[in-house]
Amino acid sequence: MNTSRLRPLLLLSLTACLAALLGACGGDNVKPTAPVAVVTPPPQQPLPKIRVGIALGGGAAKGFAHIGVIKMLEASGVQPVVVSGTSAGSVVGALYASGMDAFAMQQHAFALDEDKIRDVSLFSGGVVKGQKLQDYVNQLLGNRTLERMRKPFAAVATELETGKRMVFTRGNTGQAVRASSSIPGVFEPVVIGKLHYVDGGVVSPVPVDAARALGADFVIAVDISTKASGKAPGSLLGNINQSITIMGQRLGAQELARADIVIRPKVSDIGAADFEQKNTAILEGERAALAAMPQIRAKLAQLQRTRVAAQKARTPAPKKVVPKCEPDRLDKLLRRDPDCTPADAQ
């Protein structure tokens, strides 16, 4: 055999084997490292916005103060999305829930003539029939029904036969407002179906619970009722209105306690039938709402923190995902499983 021909072939083979072994054992392929566990936090759902509700109480002509409260809330960036109202509060509440802003409501208030809402009716269970009030509200709303309001709205009345609270959320808006505003002895009871309804202030002077039932997370209550001052009111309407207030005070206090904020405009000097002081009532509503804004903002912030903490408590623990251990070149060459033992465990 010619050894001179075999020698180059042997040298070439040995060189190739050494290069392969050195390549497999050198550099960063000496040994696979243990995979590092990756902590994957679960996706967090964004918290829904706090649904602010406003509960507007009864108080006849004092109810113009509600417009001032709403005006100041809107100017401060607090937008109620749920509305409930009793008596005068149901009138303002219906207009607001229909999409009317506070400035538009104020314009309608200034243009309001008592003759538009007063229809005298003798010998029928009341001095005022109330049909004009119903028609006036429906006209302003374009005959929009309760279920078609832009904001969820409830008008609260009292079922005369049983004394139960009735919360209207469907049907004729003007009729529901009329029922909620039918002060006993002044307005005729409103007949709906087979039942008679009177002023909601008898059972729910400030309808906080109605706002909660509509889905409000945070309820701002506006109380314009006049507390007994030791003096008798100077008119028939004032006497009746104060009598209703006295009857509902204890029940009303319990419901007001369930509100997050209570705003009380200083309208005690405005008579129940004193429509000439509507501008004063609106201004007092603005002042009372402005004074309450720091407390409203603080409580809204606290509620948001509580909601965030509750969401974190409900969130499951993050999952640890361990990547697969991949073989290096030597493992592949020798056809063996990779050694992925952590360095600190060896």
Image: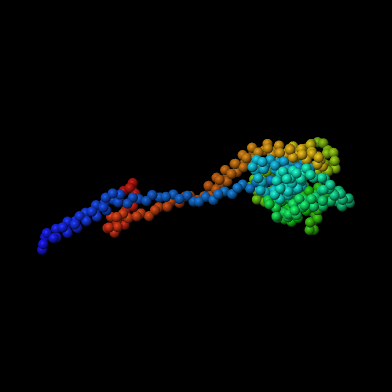
Residue 308: tell me if it is visible. Answer: yes
Residue at the image point whose x is 73% and y is 45% from the top: 104
Looking at the figure, which quarter contains the N terminus?
A: bottom left
182 horizontally vs 25: left or right: right
Residue depicted at x 52% and y 50%: 44
Q: Nearer the viewer, residue 125 or 115?
A: 115
From the viewer's perspective, tell me whether residue 175 is left or right of residue 14: right
Task: Please indicate whether residue 178 sits to the left or right of residue 151 in the image.
Answer: right
Residue displayed at 62% across by 40% down: 297
Residue sitting farthest toward the bottom: 1
163 shown above or below 72: below
For the residue pair 81 and 154, the one nearer the viewer reads as 81
Q: Residue at x 65, y 45 (%)?
A: 79
Q: Percent position (x, y) of residue 290?
A: 68, 37
Q: Where is residue 207 in the image (x, y as percent from the top left)?
A: 72, 47
Whole-percent x and y of residue 269? 79, 36
Number of marks in picture: 0
Horizontal relation, residue 207 to residue 303: left or right? right
Q: Quadrant of residue 161?
A: bottom right
* Residue 163 makes an appearance in the image: no
41 lies above or below 274: below
- Image colouring: rainbow
Can you name the residue that lies furthest to the right here?
A: 123
Residue 270 locus on image (x, y percent): 79, 38
